Amino acid sequence: MATRFALNPALSAAPAGLWVFSLLCDLLHLGGAEAELWPRLAFYSMVGGFAAALAAGALPGRASITLAVVALYAVNIWLRYANPAEAQAGMVLSVVGVIMLSVSGWAAAETVRVKGR
């Protein structure tokens, strides 16, 4: 049981890191970087983050915001898969998702600071 708790920070960081990297890829594409590479890399990073979030049990301890983020990225993945040429809506969802992840991280840190757990 101690191993599960020791892995929790690593499991929580994987989806967030992949989703932030996905947004970075979107921004690089928007800025004019190689058109073929960045949207594809953004999509696969997003899918990897979604899979990591599911493997982590949707990041226990931050359920309400985090489950909303996971649902948002599920919609984002579906939109990008259904119509890859129309990526602007997906970029907006990625920005909203990263903002929500930031709020979730802040809330978790505040809980640890105030309650000590």
Image (tube, rainbow, N blue to C red):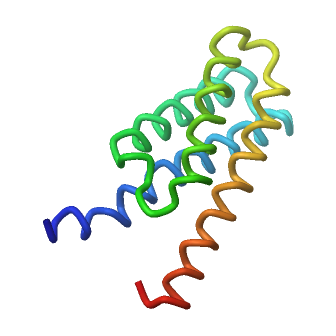
Q: Quadrant of the N terminus?
A: bottom left
**Numbered disc total:** 0
Task: Give x and y (percent) for residue 72.
Answer: 66, 35
Residue at image point 51% right, 30% down: 47
Residue 115 lies, with reference to residue 27, above or below; the image says: below
Q: Quadrant of the C terminus?
A: bottom left
Task: Give x and y (percent) for residue 87.
Answer: 79, 23
Residue 82 lies, with reference to residue 10, above or below; the image says: above
Q: Looking at the image, which residue sits at the far top? A: 82
Residue at image point 76% right, 37% down: 93
Residue at image point 48% right, 89% down: 115
Task: Give x and y (percent) for residue 13.
Answer: 45, 59
Residue 87 lies, with reference to residue 1, above or below; the image says: above
Question: Is 18 left, or right, of 102 in this rendering?
Answer: left
Residue closer to the observer: 98 or 43: 98
Residue at image point 36% right, 46% down: 57
Question: Is 86 left, or right, of 72 in this rendering?
Answer: right
Residue closer to the observer: 106 or 14: 106
Task: Give x and y (percent) for residue 36.
Answer: 68, 20
Q: Residue 33 is drawn in which quadrant?
A: top right
Residue 91 lies, with reference to residue 77, above or below; the image says: below
Q: Residue 39 is drawn in which quadrant?
A: top right
